[in-house]
Image: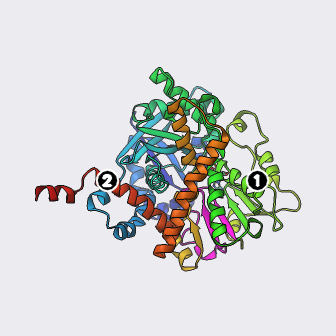
Amino acid sequence: MNQIHLIVDLSLISNGTVSHRTGLPLWTTVLVKPVLKLALGHWPTEQTCLSIPFFWYRNIEATMSNNTSHLLEDAQSRMADIYERLEVADDSRHRLGQPKRIHQASLSVRMDDGSLRVFPAWRVQYDDTRGPTKGGIRFHPNVTEDEVATLSLWMTLKCAAVDLPFGGAKGGVCVDPKTLSRLELERLSRGYIRAFHDVIGPDRDIPAPDVNTNAIVMGWMVDEYAQIARQHVPGVITGKPLGLGGSIGREEATGAGALLVMDLWAKRQNKEPHELSVAIQGFGNAGQNFARLAHHAGYKIVALSDSQGAIYNEDGLDPEPILRHKNRTRELKGMVYCGDSVCDAAATEMQTLSGDELLQLDVDVLVLAALENQITDANADHIRAKTIVEIANGPISTGGDQILQGRDITVIPDIVANAGGVIVSHLEWVQNRMGDYWSGDTVEKQLRQRLEREANACFDLADEKAVPLRTAAYLQGVRRIADAMAQQGTQGYFSDADG
Ligand code: NAD
């Protein structure tokens, strides 16, 4: 039977929109959540993805049609000013105005109980002018095509901003992976590769880990690709386990790179690490590595949060025992995901906070390492940090950014702050292609060289043009992409040739 994948925005139910449009009393619509729980086997999130038969869709569509978010539109709105400043040719503006290719698939996965579930999945290749496209794969219940496309645009800008020979892509599956067993997760990961194997490849499009995917998941994926291709192709995926052709240093690269950029920034402000207090939102791969390394470097980490809550100690806390606690569950799902929350690790000298309270702490540096749109025009007025480091992609909306700018809060933008991950992914890809592997020192030296050069160039450009760091980073990236597009031929070039 034909299936439609519907992202249901449950806020439309709680805020009464559905009740208003259907004329049903509000109390009847609140039953939707328990009904979804029965159908899905877990409580639905605010934006839940459902696979439903086509004939149901027609009725539901009428009541819930404006459920799509506008992340890509918001991200694109930041580009107009950049095009103007760089006098980018219309051809390039048109090409960067939408993704080059959007691939969609439905992944049918056999559950352990014998039932079959179907998960919507995407691979979006935004632009490949500067090289094969590159970008992670996200497993999350809120994944939508709009989100994946937006993340692929940011990957395009990031790879260009740090001068890697890559375009940008992203992948995603609308799934709550923590409700799956390990075997179900493996089947889903292999299913993703079966669905998209013909559009990825070491010279075409190279996936990597992102939210809720990691080296274990990449290992299953690279193995599935090899089985289909009937040969070893380690360069098709980065962030793999070392035994399958991964690179030393990839696991911690995003956190290490963000620390490198923060160090550079602190030096420019004549600040020593011990003088700076830091709060970190998001304690996954990127946030944990950043927290651990920043603590060793002497920064005072005062607060940490994950999706369950936050912990705080104004005298500073050591992330290592919290990390050990979070990673303690080493069985079943714990082998793939951390089972416990940071809150369970709170010792007596620590205070627990809500996630929102962490964002509003009076700290020198707020590090955002979770998801998009954490600071928007709804809460930007309450932020008290002096500097924000974006490890997550797109954690501040355009509206939120403008408010922070007006309040003189410095934002070190994602496309530079979190570029350490893709830089070491590039090093992994180079090693795979050479068939030879480097020491940790070599990887670290190459990461440092590229990131210091590109971050310093961005900081200098911001000073020279008197623009925010995000504008400078976008100028740096878009200029390189527009130059490459111009070198392929522009309207001006062909008009001149005619004349
Ligand atoms: P992850 O899945 O390992 O961790 C995500 C963390 O965020 C988890 O600890 C989760 O509990 C937490 N979280 C989710 N919602 C939250 C909320 N509302 N408040 C507080 N914490 C919350 O993912 P990751 O790989 O660490 O990625 C995090 C971010 O960094 C994403 O935006 C990702 O795109 C970006 N990023 C990651 C890499 C990488 O190499 N892993 C590279 C570049 C950018």
Q: What numbered label is drawn on residue 452?
A: none
Q: Residue at 55% x, 65% y: name it.
A: 396
Answer with left or right where residue 48 lies relative to residue 59.
right
In the depicted structure, whether residue 29 falls above or below residue 226: below
Q: For disc 2, does the CB lie below 8 Å from ligand 1?
A: no
Q: Read off the magenta span.
A: 364-393
- Residue type at mark 2 is Met
Secondary structure mostly taken by the magenta-highlighted segment of the chain: loop
Disc 1 target residue? 342
Q: Position of residue 142 (x, y in %)?
A: 54, 50
Quarter holding the N terminus? top left
Disc 2 target residue? 485
Q: CA distance from mark 2 to mark 1?
A: 46 Å
Q: Position of residue 300 (x, y in %)?
A: 77, 64
Circle 1 packing at 10 Å, graded few (<14), some (14-19), many (20+), is many
Quarter holding the C terminus? bottom left
In the depicted structure, whether residue 29 falls above or below residue 365: above
Q: Position of residue 54 (x, y in %)?
A: 39, 41
Q: Position of residue 70 (x, y in %)?
A: 43, 60
Residue 35 visible, this angle: no
Circle 2: element type: helix
Q: Residue at 51% x, 63% y: name it.
A: 457
Q: For disc 1, does the CB lie below 8 Å from ligand 1?
A: yes
In this orientation, which residue lies closer to the viewer: 160 or 101?
160
Circle 1: element type: helix
- Residue type at mark 1 is Val
The mark closer to the camera, 2 or 1, is: 2
